[in-house]
Amino acid sequence: MFKTSQEIRLNTTGTKLRNSGENVSGFGKYHKTPDMDKYSTQPAQVFVAPELTDPSLVQLLHFPNGALRVNNNVNFIIKRNGVKGNFEVKLENPSGHQMFVPLKIIDPERFEVSFTLVEAGLYKVHIKCNSVTLPKSPFIIVAISGFDLEPKAKMELPVFKSDASRVTYRGLGLSHILLNEKNEFIIDGSSAGNNILFVGIFGPKGQCDEVIVKHMGKNVYKVTYQVDDPGDYLLAAKWGDDHIPGSPFSLSTN
């Protein structure tokens, strides 16, 4: 006979509950209460309570990020971090069908999960421990058809026919600089053929922080820049590989 309440730990794997006939699996805490009558002829009463589970402690290691190709194998690790109980993993495919995924025991703390993506779409991985859903479950995996990941043809620059010597310019921004204000000028390549305009400004502390080139149409561009440090600057403007007339321009804030 028990004189006081006592707690013992039993392995109930394969045990059936008397009233429901359901199997009980895993470990749990079992609480024995003291007998009201030490000479009672009634069978001892044992009350079952599952161990508390903190699913937030469980980690997923090597879970895939980003899109994966169809027919790829997915492998990741469930790490207990001391959480006791039984784990259950279900994979929900893009069609909504769910299936149990078997777990491979690596050691008492880690399980390996492995399955194959057989169709394109959104997969959901549902994970529970002792019937408690893990935080952020279901975990999402995106499968993409092989051709969706094929690299696109590299775009190449066309062969331009132009004459940088025919580019003209105007504006105060090419004659002097105002500190901490917007400086502007216009570059007109309408008579110089098609090409790409490159503008850069180098000053006492290196490259200028802000240079904005806006196409106004018909190969006419407005250039805006701002400098914050006094001193001398060089402004280079190229039409393709060649400098426009006057480039590089020598400018000063003095």
Image (tube, helix red, strand yellow):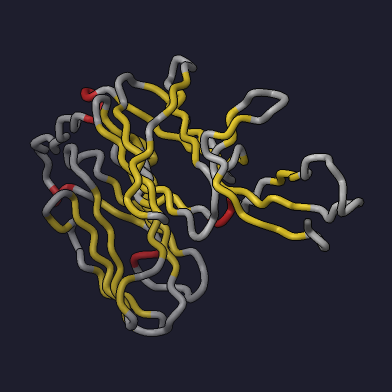
Q: Quadrant of the N terminus?
A: bottom right
Q: Quadrant of the C terminus?
A: bottom left
Residue 237 vs residue 251: left or right? left
Residue 223 vs residue 16: left or right? left
Residue 135 vs residue 161: left or right? right
Residue 187, horizontal then vertical, whole percent: 31, 51
Residue drawn 30% across and 36% down? Answer: 74
How many labels were placed on the picture?
0
Q: Quadrant of residue 169?
A: bottom left
Residue drawn 34% across and 65% down? Answer: 174
Q: Is residue 9 above or below residue 22?
A: below
Residue 235, horizontal then vertical, whole percent: 28, 68
Residue drawn 60% across and 37% down? Answer: 131
Q: Relative to the observer, which residue lies in front, 8 or 240? A: 8
Residue drawn 34% across and 81% down? Answer: 205
Q: Quadrant of residue 202?
A: bottom left
Residue 9, horizontal then vertical, whole percent: 61, 54
Q: Is residue 41 above or below residue 33?
A: above
Residue 125, horizontal then vertical, whole percent: 46, 33
